[in-house]
Amino acid sequence: MNQRHIPAPGATYRRKRPSRHYGTWSASVLHGDLQQATGMLSNPVYIGRVIWNRREWLMNPETKRRVPRLRPESDWIITEQLDLRIIPQPLWDRVQQRRKSQSQQTQLGEDQNTYYEERCLAALRDELLTPDAVERIIQKVNRLLAGRQRERQLELERLHRQLATVEDEIANIMKAIKAGILTASTKQALEQAEAERAKLLAGIAMPTTKADKMALLLPRIAERYRTIV
């Protein structure tokens, strides 16, 4: 229909904001919304049945725009105007039966979105669990682990240097105290130095780091990777 430049229903409406500027056909033009009775395959007006009072328009207080809401079916006003019919009843019935059958198959079978999602995930798993992929992960973890261990080693070296400096400072303060130099400032300097020494010792004796935990997992990294994927 688009190739023949035949406009879709509603394309010729003179609206300020037309929903279909060029009148092209799309899936929604044909199928529409079954509950809202829109679309050529859902709208009963094509078989001469006109439904009034089906929807009402309410103002959305947040967007300040009017939105449609379906009224209860008991409020609908249904009239039969057979002069408007353009589709034979048997054809209409066969189409609705086929649509109903397809809908039931979808509900009883796998959800289409879930089906494609599972297919994609399965393909990704197959790709990510090849021997080459697993080997690349192990190599990457090894590089990351080696980098973390180098960082920890550099940190330990820095802490030991600072500790040696603080130990020398404490030794000098103790010499001054033994020499009889005991003032408020001497006492404060000793307390600060001892606090700094305790802090550095705690840093050196820090329990298992992330790098150490990764090292423990390394022998089972391939197994863990397969479990995660």
Image: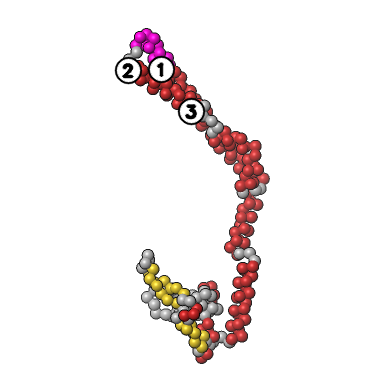
Give the mark nearest the N terminus, 2 or 1: 1
Q: Which residue is tagged 3?
A: 203
Q: Which residue is tagged 1?
A: 169
Q: Residues within 10 Å of mark 3 (few under 14, many from 20)?
A: some
- Vertical side of 18 occupied by 87: above or below: below
Q: Residues within 10 Å of mark 1 (few under 14, many from 20)?
A: some
Give the secondary structure at mark 1: helix
Q: Give how far apart the Cα atoms at labels 2 and 1 are.
A: 17 Å
**Span colored in magenta:** 168-181
Can residue 163 be found in the magenta stretch? no
Question: Going by the image, does 191 lie left or right of 32?
Answer: left
- Vertical side of 222 occupied by 6: above or below: below
Question: Going by the image, does 98 lie left or right of 16?
Answer: right
Q: Amino acid at mark 2?
A: Ala
Taking the view exactly as shown, the residue that stands out farthest to the top is 179
Give the secondary structure at mark 2: helix
Residue 222 lies, in percent from the top left, at 64, 42
Of circles 2 and 1, the one toward us is: 2
Q: Residues within 10 Å of mark 2 (few under 14, many from 20)?
A: few
Give the mark nearest the N terminus, 1 or 3: 1
Give the secondary structure at mark 3: helix
Residue plotted at (61% across, 53% down):
124
Can residue 172 be found in the magenta stretch? yes
Taking the view exactly as shown, the residue that stands out farthest to the front is 74
Q: Which residue is tagged 2?
A: 184
> Image quarter for residue 199?
top left
- Vertical side of 193 occupied by 88: above or below: below
Residue 22 in sight in this render: no
Residue plotted at (61% across, 35% down):
216
Give the mark nearest the N terminus, 3 or 2: 2
